[in-house]
Amino acid sequence: MKKVFLNLLFLIIASSPIFALETFRDTTLSDSQRIDALIKELTLEEKINLFSTNLGVPRLNIPACNHFEGLHGLSLGGPAHQRGGHPSTIHPQAYGLGETWDTDLVQRIADLSAEEARWMFSQDTMRYHSLVMRAPNADLARDPRWGRTEESFGEDPFLTGAMTVAKVKGLQGDNPRYWKMASLMKHFLANSNEFGRDSTSSEFSERLFHEYYAYPFWKGITDGGSRAFMAAYNRWNGIPMTVHPVFDQVVRPDWDMDGIICTDGGAMRLLMTAHHYVDSLPEAAALIVKAGVGQFLDNYKEALTTALQNGLVTEEDLDKALRGNIKIAIKLGLLDPDPTAIPYYISPDAPKSWETDYAHNLAREATAKSIVMLKNEPVNGNKLLPLNTDKVKRIALVGPYVDNIIQDWYGGVPAYEVTVLDAFRQTFEPMGIQVDYIIDDRMSQAEDLAREADIVFIVTGNHPFGTKADWFFSPVPSDGREAVDRRSLMLPDEDMIRQIYNVNPNTVLVLQSSFPYAINWSNENLPAILHFTHSSQETGNGLVDVVTGKVNPAGRTTQTWVKDILDLPHMMDYDITNGRTYMYFEGEPLYPFGYGLSYTSFSYDDIELSDKNIKAEDLDKVITVNVKVTNTGDMDGDEVVQLYASYPDTRDSLRPNKHLRAFQRVSIPMGESVTVPLQVKALDLAKWDENKKTWVLEPGRINLAVGPSSASQPLTTHLKVK
């Protein structure tokens, strides 16, 4: 109520004839005019203060506004057990959301997160005055050893770009003037090694910058509308991203990026201590400001003040770098005379959205849709999934995540959690089915339990963050997280899986992990394997929905699952054309990119192009590829229809073997057909020309292939570029 009172008081004062409304609050002016007006009002001390992550100016009654983390819920950063505070709706990790291949779902999830952030912003506590969301992570998971794979949507730039756009639109809303939240994407650019991330250089060409590493950020800005991102710790071709000239050479002029660029945590100091790029902190602060970076995630004030006093940076430099911060403040309505009048205002007395059935159902939907069925072969003539409850009287649950939902570093605090054990008991025990549980096979107890069961579900995988306070400590080589890369792709519990399977062949592996594993033995021997990620508050219900067939699985892999760690190039080789990702990998994967099974089957027929010929200069052209898909099985289900392009006439050795150019997740009832329209932009068939500094379409034939994965495209046609 205190906030409401102050707002009313401000409006009364503002309406008084003796009070002159500050020019920066005049909503009839352009954004640029309002920015100019506010900069004139600010003292030098206030300008320095605005280089923090707080957009507020107390003297001018501009409210405090900080950052949230928000990859799959709201978080203030750090392990969940250390955070406390308000809960929020927690969905599967970003890697799992990528595996849904459902942009509409991702947008709805982001919209809910923004709704919850707006409610928290309305409360009388500085701790939750946050409307800038550090999400999505638009980095590409070029290597499954990367510790932060859990935060990404996958290895493919087109899929990641589409998911990034969906997340941005959901967070920011569709109002032409205001944003619900500001989406601040992470981490620009090519930050996919954790060991040495504060000092290593990612080496690759300008072409790969545009075609691969920067592509999701470009789409997030130009298609999604984001006007904020965080610079990565690493260097690109020798220059730290914190101060990289690409901001002024490409990002601002070509992408119209006129908002916030912020450093990563402690990046100013790292310019001196890790990169050895400068000799002092004032030099580091000055370089950051001159690069147009407007926010420090660092203890920067003393260094920046000294830089000003020593003439390393000027007040005009500050003014220029701060413009993006103020632009975001305007879009959030922070500078308006009546903050209650903006369309996204939420009353502090409004219901808590995370307590609604809508929020609970959305988390459950996301969990079920994220599940990838990697294998489902019959045992004695019958498939184990979906579960035939008429023939099951006893279920054994084994594994560390049966009764334990792990919240990762950038997850939040859920209002409640439904574990696998909770959901199985709530679902099956009323049917007269006994559900037993044990955490592992100590003293061969899991084997004993398995012998007595009709079916066994083993729920195991990685642990999303370290078990000690040591930031760099991770005792399991195949685990990874921020600051720690994986050194192994082996699943530690595969020996336990072998032992259990040895006594009960009706064994289902539920791999709950933030990245791929080389589960060769399990794939060869187990009849059924499911994959999903950690953290969802509806983990158990989502899994049960798929196991029972209430939801027909349609998740798809978003990385190439290799069979052997030796299939991967050198960890620090950022040139993906050297055999990295499905686009350039020449080996046989364990599971290909875009792969996932269903309880039903689909056929593909009748592919038609809206245009069979286009001109090389028609980069704005959009080609529609219509494909008829039929559900030929005995269950309703979703199919993820994927279109890949390849270039048989090219003489360019750097063109990918194939790459995703369109996709759509569609629901198809049993026995019915749908015509799926796939929109392919000519610009997305172009390549970056380093000499011309632009996108170009090569003359010749472009093959367009459509199917359920990168390894299966039953329909092909071609487009001619003249």
Image: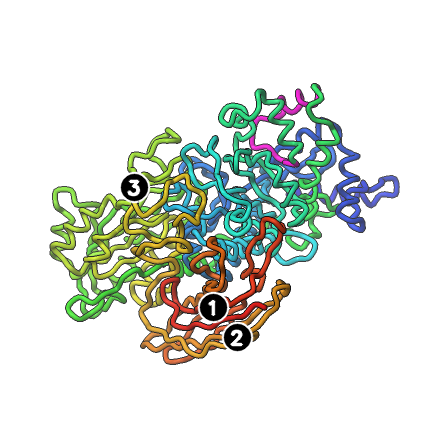
Q: Secondary structure under badge 2?
A: strand
Indicate the amino acid at tag 3. Ser
Q: Secondary structure under badge 1?
A: strand
Which label number is shown at residue 47? none
- Callout 3 environment at 10 Å: few (<14), some (14 to 19), or many (20+)? some
Residue at the (67%, 22%) spot, across then down: 307
3 or 1: tag closer to the N-terminus: 3
Residue nearest the viewer, comparing 74 with 253: 253
Indicate the amino acid at tag 2. Leu
Query: In this orientation, does residue 685 appear?
Result: yes
Residue nearest the viewer, comparing 450 with 152: 152
Query: In this orientation, does residue 109 appear?
Result: no
The residue carrying mark 1 is 704
- The Cα atoms of the two marked residues, 3 and 1, are separated by 36 Å
- The Cα atoms of the two marked residues, 2 and 1, are separated by 10 Å
Image coordinates for residue 484, horizontal then vertical, percent: 38, 36
2 or 3: tag closer to the N-terminus: 3
- Is label 2 or label 3 in front? 2
Residue 172 appears left or right of 635: right
Query: Do callouts 2 and 3 mark residues in contact (Cβ within 8 Å)?
Result: no
Image coordinates for residue 228, horizontal then vertical, percent: 61, 44
> Magenta segment: does it hold 717?
no
Residue nearest the viewer, comparing 87 with 662: 662
Residue 440 appears left or right of 15: left
2 or 1: tag closer to the N-terminus: 2
Residue 507, image quadrant: bottom left
The answer to whether residue 632 is above or below residue 48 is below
Which label number is shown at residue 488? 3
The residue carrying mark 2 is 609
The C terminus - image quarter: bottom right
- Callout 1 environment at 10 Å: few (<14), some (14 to 19), or many (20+)? many
Indicate the amino acid at tag 1. Leu
